[in-house]
Amino acid sequence: MRRLFAFHGGVKPPAHKAQSTALPIAVAPLFSEYVIPLHQSIGGAPRPLVADGDPVLKGQKIGGADGNVSAAVHAPTSGTVKAVEMRRMPHASGLSALCVVLEPDGDERWIERAPFDHKNASPDALRDYLRDTGIVGLGGAAFPSYLKLNPGKEGRLDVLVINGAECEPFITCDDTLMRERAATVIAGAAIMREMLAAKSVIIGIEDNKPEAIAAMRTAAQGRDMAVVAVPARYPAGGAKQLIRVLTGIEVPHGKRSTDYGVQCFNVGTAVGIHDAIALGAPLISRIVTVAGNVVHPRNYEVLFGTKMQDLLALAGKLPDTDRIIMGGPMMGLPMPGEEVPVVKATNCILAGSQALLPPPPPEMPCIRCGECALACPADLQPFELYWFSRAKLFGRAQEYHLFDCIECGCCAYVCPSNIPLVDYYRFAKSEIWAREREKEAADAARSRFEFRTKREAREKAEKAEKLQARTAIRSVTETDPAAAEKKALIAAAIARAQQQKAEVRPQNIDNLTLEQRAEISAIESRRARFHEMAKTAADEDT
Amino acid sequence: MNNSPYFRQPVSVQAVMLKVLAALLPGLAAYVWFFGAAILVQIALASSAALAGEAAMLMLRRRPLALFLSDGSALVTAWLLALSLPPLSPWWLTVVATLFAIIVVKHLYGGLGQNPFNPAMAAFCVVIVAYPQLLSQWPSPASGDFMNQWQMIFAGAREHVDALTMATPLDALRTGLHAGTGKAAAILGGTQGMGVLAGQGWEWVAVGYLAGGLWLIQQRIITWHIPAAFIAVFLAVASAFHLGSADRFAPPLFHLFSGGALLCAFFIATDPVSAATTPRGKLIYAAGIAFLTYIIRVFGAYPDGIAFATLLMNICVPLIDMWTQPPVFGHKK
Ligand code: SF4
Ligand code: SF4
């Protein structure tokens, strides 16, 4: 028996997983239009590589990775580009972003595919290949995988963790994937083990998925990989929680787990990596659970860019559906509409209704009962964070480790006062980022101002000097002003250059860890919504 | 606006408070059994006053009336206060104390969840300072005639008060020791109404609180930290004094089962709003209350120390919480 390490807190919400696992994975049919957002992963938005009217093949790169953190996107099927335009994103903010709109021709003509010889490729070539095949983490964070697939300082990794825990209610895409394609998952894990020179591989699966565990054990036979059943307890599927459960290692917030000798990938990512390396296929589809208020909850293999409404129609969305959530009920995001596309981060489309996801009872004041602290897997004191966020004492909130909060929702789940605690943390985080930026802008302005004052003082002094010089040497008056003018011109040019330097983007934003950047981009787009909430909170305070 | 999580555990403040009330029932039953129904009258008085005061304040503060009136928190305050006051207190004393607790200590500090002081204990302190005489009149176990009790509470028929009340063993011990009438054991032995461990009847009430409190832990309404630290430290301090001088200090179990010690351990010190919240903080907080309770009880001028001790530790809560923040994930050691 392997020794497991419990994590603090966690909750046991009703699982609702049986409904969508009754049927095997179905391949979604071709729909009439696909909307492929170029920006589907953490990091830079890929540049569009196609334009209106271009014919594309299935798997053709249509968005090129941009910058160090980015992943390419590809045409999910063959057809014609109808437009490259702004469309609503599957994001709570409802903001639009650049998308390639594709009309399929129905032929499913692939690009040429060839396996990639990762064993003989240089690390750079491998990295570029994974970036250009668009491989990102499919657990929901959509973090470009090539960034995690370097073995770290030591040159090799102690433990490679494959995450099949899938703790959120309703979501079963990983479960069915492991049941039906266990061999591919294992093959993908084996490839990653080679890339990372990992000493051991542990596959963690929540013990409420006996079929998946059995299938994975069979597939892993003779492969020297441990398939470990972990106690079902939300959020056991959080990467940091699973790493802790399986290895006892706690990776602090903002640190790379590689530096702690461990790295964690979702089972879906393992399949993506397998397909990219062994088949030469870029990432163009994933398994998506369609569940909740639908007649036929089920898992589909879905091409990216498929509109959620098409899948919901397939699953038989019930008429009293009042909202669509991407992800599960604990951490899912409310969608701005049903026309938004499935992206790499879409693990589940949850149709909600009043009956299924009833609105919480009225919010009461916090009675400091500490239930939230007992439930918090990050070992935080959520109610303290709540008090500070509500009072806008953001500095104090940060002292109490606001940014260690993973927004898992356990605290709000158990709160007897029905306080939407996570909303307060989201609000506080976005305000802190906003203030940080304002402060940086102000700093830049201040240094500009200081520079100008200095320059003015210098110019004054220079003028005075010049005057002196002029009065002193009257005989050479003809040449002096010209020289002084020249000098002034040079000074002004230098000043401009320095001013420009001061105006470049605040440095803090460049030196962030990838996780922090991920956080910012997620926080950013949510921001607008919280102003409304802040107002309500302020009203209540009076 | 409604964001994730969309699932909520079906718990509510009301459910929490109702469980606290339910947990008081065993102690209350023993109370009625040994000392008659007067306590029920007091609970009814305190409850009505608490609800009236709560309603008035909610209306003044323009808060949703039904939502907050039904949360049960006012009732918990009322019950704890009623159980702390002598059951034969005149009706107005209970009413005034309860209104003070609800209006001043709870609502003027911002209402549910905002009060730094335990409302019941703050009100208790005020009335014990104002009416020390009334608060020393505890019923004797044979005082169960309800008509007499009723008259004492409502008709002010307090001329018979001496017939129905007596000094509790805790009081008798203090007076005896002060007067130098003998050694602790002898005084207690000679006290009328002394039971096995502590006051006759009172010890069973305490057992009832103990049972209810353990149930609260089992129900996860409170954690073990505060009761365990309270009882452990209380016994430790009492044992130390008792071992040091058995003549002057009563045995530890006598102290634990006398007065409000167990009520405090499970129901008063555990009031979440005014207590420390971190695990280590709870231990320190409860240890402080236990220590102070013993000291005030034994060396102070008042019969019991739980109220003062609780308020004193309430003041320390922000500091305790600040100093005892547990390490967060990934930052341990
Ligand atoms: S669970 Fe809710 S009421 Fe209890 S301490 Fe946390 S925030 Fe406050
Ligand atoms: S949402 Fe944040 S504060 Fe709440 S339980 Fe999860 S990690 Fe803790």
Image (cartoon, coloured by chain):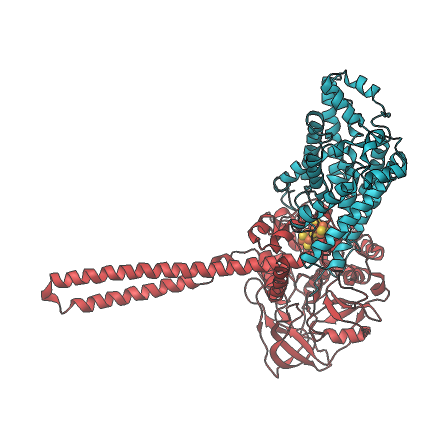
Chain colours: A red, B cyan
Tell which of A204 and A120 is nearer to you.
Answer: A204
Q: Is residue A160 visible?
A: no
Residue A461 point in image, percent of width and height:
23, 59
Count of all numbered marks drawn on residues in the image: 0
Residue at x 70%, y 78% (from the top left corner): A109
Tell which of A125 and A452 is nearer to you.
Answer: A452
Relative vertical location of residue B231 with respect to residue B91 in this rendering, above or below? above
* Residue that extends furthest to the left in the rendered view of this protein: A475
Tell which of A393 and B264 is nearer to you.
Answer: B264
Residue A113 point in image, percent of width and height:
68, 71
Q: Is residue B227 visible?
A: yes
> Position of A270 compared to B323: left or right?
right
* Residue that extends furthest to the bottom in the rendered view of this protein: A53
> Position of B245 compared to A504: left or right?
right
Relative vertical location of residue A260 with respect to residue B280 in this rendering, above or below? below
Q: Quadrant of the N terminus of chain A?
A: top right
Q: Quadrant of the C terminus of chain A?
A: bottom right
Residue A502 point in image, percent of width and height:
41, 61
Residue at x 19%, y 62% (from the top left corner): A466
Asked where in the image residue A343 lies, by quadrant, the reply is bottom right
Residue B292 point in image, percent of width and height:
68, 31
